Image (cartoon, rainbow, N blue to C red):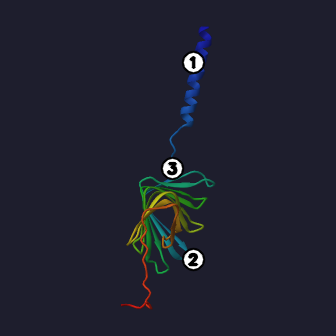
Amino acid sequence: MLLAIGILFSCVNDVEQVESLTKQEKIPINKGRNVELIYSEKSDVKVKVTAPLMEEYGTEENKYIEMREGIKVLFYDSLVQVISTLTSNYAIHRVGERVMEAKDDVVVINDKGEKLNTEHLIWNEDSAKIYSDEFVKITTQDEIIMGEGMEANQDFSKWKIHKIKGTINIKEETDSSAVQN
């Protein structure tokens, strides 16, 4: 009986050792501080991404870049003028999928001064769209619009909110041909 308990205890310890070896902390294959990436298309700069820390993980098939200390993305027009910015406290870029997720205090501001606030935003590089299924707040010069979810082009110049909440101002236009007293 004692021998069987000793063997069982020894097997449990061996299993725990194997599990502890296989649960090792993930180690990045590349790591950089104060990194700046520039995306261009036909030699035209389109996007600049900066992050205090970038860590690359995975293999060629499932590579991803994690930015745990935040991110800043600048979107440019054809004259290399900044037309919008995106910031967040965390981001992950799934390289093969060409998708970046920004989380934790995500803010997008376009050149018209319109501001998007949310906690989760996805940027699809192929479709050049940004979207969220979570609570969003867009502040314009005249109004604050809230909703559950939104979609926009990547530079945030055209956007649409889903499940709108809040007050929206509607400007009435007067008919100039109306007779005045």
Tell me residue 25's x, y (percent).
50, 41
Residue 123 screen position, x and y as percent: 53, 63
Q: Is label 3 in a helix, a strand or a loop?
A: loop
Q: Amino acid at mark 2?
A: Lys
Which amino acid is tagged 3? Pro
Where does the image place residue 1, in percent across and percent down from the top left?
62, 8
Residue drawn at x 51%, y 49% as measured from the top left = 28
The vertical placement of 14 against 136, above or below, is above
In the displayed structure, 21 sits above or below 86; it is above
- Given the current orientation, which residue lies at the most extreme top position? 1
Rounded to the nearest angstrom, the CA distance separating label 2 from label 1 is: 65 Å
The dot on residue 28 is 3
Q: Mark 1 — residue?
A: 9
| Residue 3, quarter of the rendered image | top right
Q: Are marks 3 and 1 in contact (CB under 8 Å)?
A: no
Q: At label 1, which amino acid type do we have?
A: Phe
Q: Position of residue 78 (x, y in %)?
A: 50, 80
In the image, is residue 99 above or below residue 20?
below
Question: In the rendered image, which residue does mark 2 sit on?
Answer: 42
- Residue drawn at (53%, 51%), measured in percent from left and top? 29
Residue lying at 61% horizontally and 59% vertically, measured from the top left = 97
Query: Camera-side residue: 26 or 115?
Result: 115
Looking at the rendered structure, the number of numbered marks drawn on it comes to 3
